[in-house]
């Protein structure tokens, strides 16, 4: 799943001129990788607090505005990480933060699209279970969300 998230990061941020111009030359790959790590870890953390994968996906699908709890938590960790690890200025991290809700919407769409097998409920569950070290509790609760 990480590779798929990294692909989404590169697609969304690479095609956004404001974001692409804010990332220092030569650091794009490292920044994209860090964003993908933060998004993946953020999803794992949010799954634990949202009642598992089903709760997480319901939150992602239900509203990806910049004020949603899932988006806000992930954006906060991405901005903090990019500022501390790469010294990106607020203008750069702000442009990246503005692009993240769209990226998360794409993730949720791919995960729930029965015709798109790049990100599936099983890959999400497996990845997040590994990241959570088994502490995510019941990752079921998928109900009819993915049928």
Image (tube, helix red, strand yellow):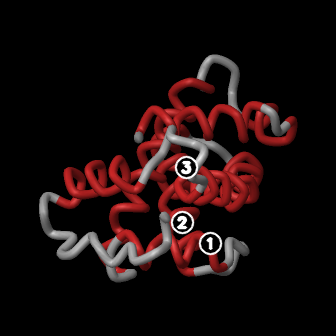
Which residue does the numbered mark 1 point to in the structure image? Answer: 61
**Label 3 neighbourhood size at 10 Å, few (<14), some (14-19), many (20+)?**
some
Which residue shows up at 48% across the image and 61% down it?
77
Q: Nearer the viewer, mark 2 or mark 1?
A: 1
Tell me how far mark 3 sits from mark 1, CA to CA.
Answer: 29 Å
Tell me how far mark 2 sits from mark 3, CA to CA.
Answer: 11 Å
Tell me the number on the disc at residue 11.
none
* Quadrant in the rendering for residue 108: bottom right
Tell me how far mark 2 sits from mark 1, CA to CA.
Answer: 20 Å
Which residue does the numbered mark 3 point to in the structure image? Answer: 83
Q: Quadrant of the N terminus?
A: top left
Task: Report helix, strand or loop for mark 2.
Answer: helix
Residue farthest to the left, as pictured: 134
Which residue shows up at 51% across the image and 64% down it?
74
Which residue shows up at 80% across the image and 33% down it?
15
Is residue 15 positioned above or below 125 on the image? above
Residue 109, given in percent of the width and then of the height, sits at: 63, 56
Residue 27, given in percent of the width and then of the height, sits at: 59, 24
* Quadrant in the rendering for residue 55: bottom left
Tell me the number on the disc at residue 76.
2
Using residue 87 as the reference point, say whether residue 95 is left or right of it.
right
Residue 144, given in percent of the width and then of the height, sits at: 46, 75
Mark 2 or mark 1: whose residue is earlier in sequence:
1
Which residue shows up at 37% across the image and 53% down it?
124
């Amino acid at each position: 799943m990480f590779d798929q998230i990294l692909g989404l990061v590169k697609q969304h941020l690479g095609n956004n001129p404001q974001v692409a111009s804010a990332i220092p030359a030569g650091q794009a790959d490292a920044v994209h990788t860090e964003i993908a790590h933060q998004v993946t870890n953020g999803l794992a953390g949010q799954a634990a607090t949202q009642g598992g994968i089903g709760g997480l996906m319901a939150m992602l699908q239900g509203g990806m505005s910049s004020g949603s709890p899932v988006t806000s938590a992930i954006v906060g960790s991405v901005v903090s990480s990019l500022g501390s690890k790469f010294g990106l200025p607020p203008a750069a991290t702000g442009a990246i933060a503005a692009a993240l809700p769209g990226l998360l919407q794409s993730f949720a769409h791919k995960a729930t699209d029965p015709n798109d097998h790049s990100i599936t409920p099983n890959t999400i569950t497996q990845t997040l279970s590994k990241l959570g070290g088994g502490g995510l509790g019941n990752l079921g609760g998928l109900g009819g969300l993915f049928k």
